[in-house]
Amino acid sequence: MSRIIAADEAGIELAARTLQDGSLVAFPTETVYGLGAAALDPHAVRRIFEMKGRPSDHPVIVHLPLDATLEAWATPVPNLARQAAEAFWPGPLTLVLHRSDTVPDAVTGGQATVALRMPDHPVAQALLQAYGGAIAAPSANRFGRISPTRAEHVASEFHEDDLLILEGGASRIGLESTILDLSRDTPTLLRPGAVTHAMLETVLGRPVTVAGTQADVPRAPGRLESHYAPRAPTRLASADELSTPTCVEPGGALLLRDAMPPIASGVTTLRLPNDPEGYAHGLYDALRSLDAEQPSEIVIERPPTDPAWVAILDRLARASHPGGPSRTREQSATLPTASSDAKEEP
Ligand code: TXA
Ligand code: MG
């Protein structure tokens, strides 16, 4: 049984000891909750993959305490990495760098690079401090599912597992960190997040390439087209489409912004704030709540396309991707666990 515990002194101590013993701990960050293991313990890191149901060649992010140095994890450390860390750490930015010899293969999926992030959440930092080292952690969801932004989300993903979960309230940002690859000739944005493309170009003083679907991009589940998907078939609809009474099928559910006037009656409807920060903060919680109703489909009002919404649009595109793990209600009734069916794009 998973267990949510308060992040007081005793809770942090217990969690730190659990990591030292080679077991896993779920903990809050400002982006989403992570499923953590001692980063230098390959055996502990492998447990993450078992628990998530994630292929073991997928790399995980190393979370660093405030006093960590990049040199301990990366060689060489380019000046651009120092500039980015100086500007955005602690915070929602992950840097991909050439790894140093100390980083276990289990963390990098055997790749020559390592992903590093210094989280900006008091509970995450208290845990890192008490544990006394770095923590490898992916998002604390089963492979292919929506990232958790509350302790209860983690508990529902892993209710049958023996997992300690530190309570940290709702994640402030609510979307996974921006991933910037600085191991290549040009800085490359692998995953959009709260640290935007424009912010990165300003701080780095040079252009940042946005990764497409080119074959040379390292394996990154966040880049699979069908990631972050609810169980119900999910699609986006414009305000125009939503103005017709048949915009959602019977038994369907709607996710709208506050500004949208009421549409279909008798349809489960959730609303999110009009501003991108508020929307991102509530998005995964809303998708989970709607999905829990087992609707025949989830229809999401298409948000604006201006740059402030890029990270949200990225996640919504994945949540609504037809190749995703979404399925009809009939099919999902025969699939007891979320992990058994996550599909990966070729
Ligand atoms: O906000 C976040 O980043 C959260 C919190 C817990 O820190 N973590 C998170 O982890 O989203 P995860 O594993 O769900 O996504 C991390 C992404 C994956 O797409 C992974 O493949 C990619 O980072 N990644 C890790 N190491 C990499 C590397 N060496 N090169 C390229 N991508 C890498
Ligand atoms: Mg994830």
Image: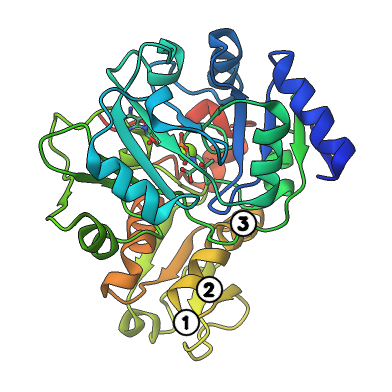
Amino acid carrying mark 3 in the image? Ser
Q: Residues within 10 Å of mark 1 (few under 14, many from 20)?
A: some
Viewer-nearest of discs 1 and 3: 3
Q: Which residue is mark 3?
A: 171
Q: Residues within 10 Å of mark 2 (few under 14, many from 20)?
A: some
Amino acid carrying mark 2 in the image? Gly
Residue shown at the point (57%, 54%) measured from the top left:
30
x and y, in percent, of residue 75 in the image: 29, 22
Is residue 199 visible from the viewing direction of this image? yes
Query: Please, which residue is most extreme toward the right here?
Result: 10
Disc 1 element? loop
x and y, in percent, of residue 209 in the image: 14, 49
**Which circle's residue, 3 or 2, is located before the other in the chain?**
3
Measured in 3D between alpha carbons, the distance from the residue under mark 2 to the one under mark 1, in whole angstroms, is 7 Å
Rendered view: 346 above or below 206? above
Between residue 294 and residue 4, name the one nearer to us: 4
**Which circle's residue, 1 or 3, is located before the other in the chain?**
3
Q: Quadrant of the N terminus?
A: top right
Residue shown at the point (71%, 41%) measured from the top left:
126
Residue labelled 3 has its Cβ within 8 Å of some atom of ligand 1: no
Mark seen at residue 274: 1
Q: Which residue is mark 2?
A: 278
Mark 3 and mark 1 in contact (Cβ < 8 Å)?
no
